[in-house]
Image (cartoon, rainbow, N blue to C red):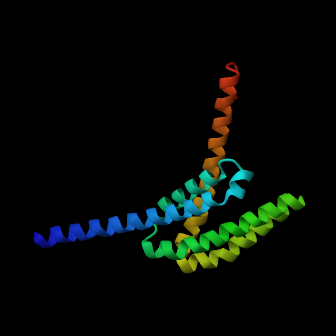
Amino acid sequence: MLMKIMDQKNRQRIKMKKFCLIYVAISLLALGLFAQENESEQKPGGGRIAVLKIAYISKQLNLTPEEAQRFWPVYNQYEGEIKKVRLEAIQNKEPEITTEEKVLNIRKKYNGEFVKALSPQRADQFFKCEKEFGAFISNELIKRRQMRMQQRHPNFRP
């Protein structure tokens, strides 16, 4: 009986440590994102979406503290390279297919890094949840536009 209670307390401590580590990691990432004023000036709300994306990925992958320590630095490099390619594509007015090919090459390159940080299945899960988050944001933006149109024009039907 005493061992059972001790075991429960140890589990609770581990859960609390895991929660605290993830909270600290997300807070540090959020702080870094908000510190980058130039990016947030380019896209209003971009920093908030990035923080939501980090929280979504954290929840979906359910990373252990050790995995989080290995995963987030790789993720930050990955995200930085993708942003750089997309910004250069806009500035140079590259065709969409060229940009997407470059992004795919970055994803292939980092797949191996994510596999080292997690596992092949979890790396695949990351790419899936990244895609799901993009679809969620896209749907949310569409819903909000429709709501604004309905508020401005009450007879509007999508």
Q: Residue at x 61, y 65 (%)?
A: 127
Please, which residue is most extreme toward the left here?
1
Give the position of the N terminus as an image quadrant. bottom left
Towards the viewer: 70 or 124 = 70
Towards the viewer: 132 or 20 = 20
Give the position of the C terminus as an image quadrant. top right
Q: Position of residue 156 (x, y in %)?
A: 70, 23
* Residue 42 shown left or right of residue 60 in the figure: right
Q: Is residue 141 above or below residue 132?
A: above
* Residue 15 shown left or right of residue 78 in the figure: left
Residue 94 seen in render: no
Residue 46 seen in render: yes
Q: Position of residue 19 (x, y in %)?
A: 39, 63
Q: Residue at x 62, y 42 (%)?
A: 140
> Number of marks in the image?
0
Q: Position of residue 116 (x, y in %)?
A: 56, 80
Quadrant in the rendering for residue 99: bottom right
Q: Residue at x 22, y 67 (%)?
A: 9
Q: Residue at x 11, y 71 (%)?
A: 2
Quadrant in the rendering for residue 77: bottom right
Quadrant in the rendering for residue 66: bottom left
Towards the viewer: 124 or 22 = 22
* Residue 89 shown left or right of residue 28 in the figure: right
* Residue 80 shown left or right of residue 4 in the figure: right
Please, which residue is most extreme toward the top here?
155
Q: Position of residue 150 (x, y in %)?
A: 66, 25
